[in-house]
Amino acid sequence: MNPSVPLSSKPTGRPGIDRDYTLADFDFHLPPELVAQHPAAQRSASRLLDGRAELPVDRVFRELPGLLDARDLLVFNDTQVIKARLFGEKSTGGAVEALVERLLPQHEVWAHVRASKSPKVGSVVRFAGAFDAQVMGRCGPDNALFHLRFPEDPLALLQRHGHVPLPPYITHEDSAEDESRYQTIFAAKPGAVAAPTASLHFDEAVLAALDERGIRRANITLHVGAGTFQPVRTENLREHQMHSEWFEVSEATVAAIEDTRARGGRVWAAGTTTMRALESAARTPDGRLQSGARDTDIFITPGFDFRVVDGLITNFHLPKSTLMMLVSAFAGYEHIMALYRHAIEARYRFFSYGDAMLLQRAPS
């Protein structure tokens, strides 16, 4: 890795993937001690790097309501993290670890499965010493997932026998603290295997302060998949295939956004998952936001044509990740790299349990 956060004079580029950017442009050195292993004692006590202006301002997250305008709309992802990690064994006795990626009808799921030898189609895996799951086949991109059938409601089985699917950079085993804190306080619709982490900083006091200022709220649902941690393995960004995630934007949220525009307000996305859902829903011929539910594999890189989101609340992301590309596309590459250099020098805490930053869309 590079010894410091790279600063470059790359141009903003055109809509789509800018050929001038490669994977190496999004690399930086992060001292390992800055990777947060546990959440802050209080959700809203996390630090907030205000990156709206050229020079960063160090704040605390509970200050957020005072930084928004009463005409603004804040959009959240109301997905709920499920206890998606299961441990078990094959009929041969070999150890198996599964991460449920997607819930399906008829007690079926798609899952990532790790074992010394992949289980065969038609075989049975016993999870948690408690229930058997039948291997129906392979599925997903490149047949990387396994299609499993559970004996009863998968959500109920996961709640009883599963583990909180902590990200790979959190090194401790999941605990009662994680079950509570790796979940937003407004999580409502189960299906995610990773939390919409920017929203982990919101507590009842911050929501009450938003209401007091007259800042309205709306929801989308995007069930975050394990692919959010998938590394980019090619220097040429055009060759990277994004993972697919299910999302839904309601008619009420579309109406709230249109009303906000009419009032002269701004649309703020609480997190990159919310941004992905909103911008995916606006990939229509006329650029208008469309309600409904579908999958998205949108890849947001420098030069992307943003149509919905004006401001973004987000955590700090992994080097060389698609989310580094997303925030660089939104706020400007040079600006993001300068903010990350400041965050490292100021000892901000990184990734899922880390601190947050406040960004606004760079002029096109």
Image (cartoon, rainbow, N blue to C red):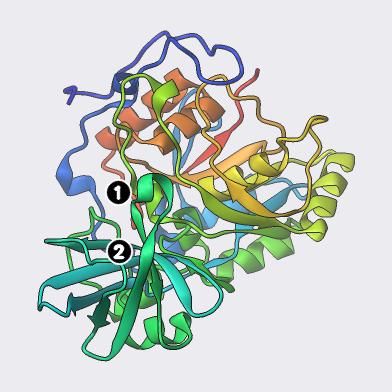
Residue 198 locus on image (x, y percent):
48, 53
Mark closer to the observer (1, 2): 2
In the image: residue 118, left or right of residue 255: left
Category of crowding for the residue at label 1, using alpha-carbon neighbours closer than 10 angstroms: few (below 14), some (14–19), many (at least 20): many
Residue 15 locus on image (x, y percent):
61, 18
Give the distance between the C-alpha atoms of the residues marked 1 and 2, in whole angstroms.
Answer: 17 Å
Res 331 label: none
Which type of secondary structure does the marked residue at label 1 adopt?
loop
Image height check: is 183 above or below 345?
below
Q: Quarter holding the C terminus? A: top right
Residue 84 locus on image (x, y percent):
37, 71
Which type of secondary structure does the marked residue at label 2 adopt?
loop
Image height check: is 108 above or below 36?
below
Q: Quadrant of residue 116?
A: bottom left
- Amino acid type at mark 1: Arg
Identify the mark nearer the N-term, 1 or 2: 2
What residue does disc 2 label? 166
What residue does disc 1 label? 349
Q: Nearer the viewer, residue 75 or 232?
A: 232
Q: Residue furthest bottom?
A: 130
The answer to whether residue 302 shows anywhere in this view is yes
Image height check: is 212 above or below 142?
below
- Tell me what residue is drawn at x 50 percent, y 47 percent: 244
- Amino acid type at mark 2: Leu
- Tell me what residue is drawn at x 56 percent, y 75 percent: 105
In the image: residue 9, left or right of residue 3: right
Q: Nearer the viewer, residue 339 or 79?
A: 79
In the image: residue 66, left or right of residue 351: right
- Tell me what residue is drawn at x 28 percent, y 68 percent: 98
Q: Quarter holding the N terminus? A: top left
Residue 197 locus on image (x, y percent):
44, 56
Q: Nearer the viewer, residue 116 or 50?
A: 116
